[in-house]
Image (cartoon, helix red, strand yellow):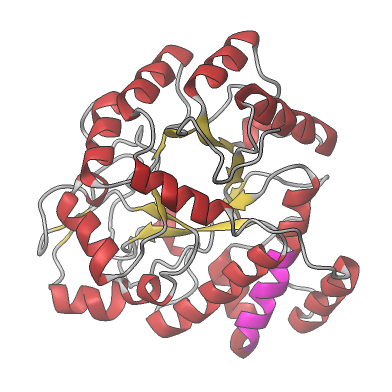
Amino acid sequence: MRPVGSDQVRPFGATIIDATGQRLTADEKAFFRDANPIGFILFARNIDTPDQVRALCDEMREAVGHDAVITIDQEGGRVQRMRAPHWREWLPPLDFVAIAGARAEEAMYLKYRIIADELRAVGIDSNCAPMVDVAGHATHEFLRNRCYGSDPARVGNIGRAVANALLAGGVLPVVKHIPGHGRATMDSHFDLPCVDAARADLDALDFAPFRALNDLPMGMTAHLVFDAIDPRPATLSAVMMQLIREDIGFDNLIMTDDISMNALSGTPAENAKGAIEAGCDVVLYCNAPLEDRRRVVEAAGEMTPAAMTRARRALSMRKAPDDVDISAMDAQLEALLGGAGHG
């Protein structure tokens, strides 16, 4: 594969897209070659055995002709695409952190270093984690047990441990959902959440963990409205993107959450164009027919020069894994949690 570096001539397509099944079709291979996305995302439907996943990742990179980043949601609990019998099962993060107690940072580091090892072994080099949305009493159930807690400083510290573990394992972390999804009382897969908190409260609570992690290579937006700041969903809001870049200080690669989610009212192509115009670098689009994917790729276009600079910076953080004994880490984690960490 052609490596990503300063000699990259053709800009990447400003998209991260998915495949329909466990191997690429001929039409998908041709489409991916033309679209030249910066990367791909995998779902449960793409996962069978380690050999199959490895072959699929190879096909994806071969189709685009560069070392495309391949990401996945491997949090634990409901949001875990790779499962038993081939991979470890994990408790939801909130439950896991509660069991670990005062040693949550250490436990989460071990957990995600083990996850990184499983991902890299099959060709996956990114994980959509840490998720540092701060849980509140009204956080919607689709999100709540995926959170790390309700104290923003502790959430940020745990998020840092997760990110460090993934980076040590050669996996790029994607911090989500910028600038904070914890106050949402609706599931953004189906509805558009609106948050009426004052700006000062948002700064002190919701935005704080993202500010603490603003050096991470990649971030994912939140599909929700902050009434005190702008009436448009954050993903489509130039005002919110400026806040993320300047106030939160996140100047690395920003991808949208899936633009097919019902929180966004436009067509996927309209949402793709709107997200890029607002200041997102990359559009994530999932679970759609090939023709719809074509429309989104066309609407998103190629990455801007500024986005390409951020992409190169992010991808340069993709390193070879450190040399650790995973079985010893597994035993250490089991001892720390008293054998209660797995689902």
Which span is picked out in magenta?
103-113
On-image quarter of the C terminus: bottom right
Q: Residue at x 48, y 22 (%)?
A: 35
Left or right of 265 on screen, residue 88: right
Report whether residue 128 is seen. Answer: no
The percent coordinates of residue 143 (x first, y second) are 42, 58
Question: How many labels sit on residues?
Answer: 0
The percent coordinates of residue 108 (x first, y second) are 64, 73
Q: In this view, does 273 lie above or below 279?
A: above
Q: Which residue is drawn at 64% across and 22% down?
A: 63
Please tell me in which quadrant of the rendered image residue 267 appears.
Answer: top left
Name the dominant secondary structure of the magenta segment. Answer: helix
Out of 8 and 271, give the one closest to the viewer.
Answer: 8
Q: Is residue 125 above or below residue 343?
A: above
Residue 112 inside the magenta-drawn segment: yes
The residue sitting at the bottom extreme is 102
Out of 86 and 120, give the one closest to the viewer.
Answer: 120
Residue 251 inside the magenta-drawn segment: no
The percent coordinates of residue 165 (x first, y second) are 66, 69
Report whether residue 279 is seen. Answer: yes
Q: Is residue 180 above or below residue 14?
A: below
The percent coordinates of residue 159 (x first, y second) are 52, 72
Out of 199 and 45, give the one closest to the viewer.
Answer: 199
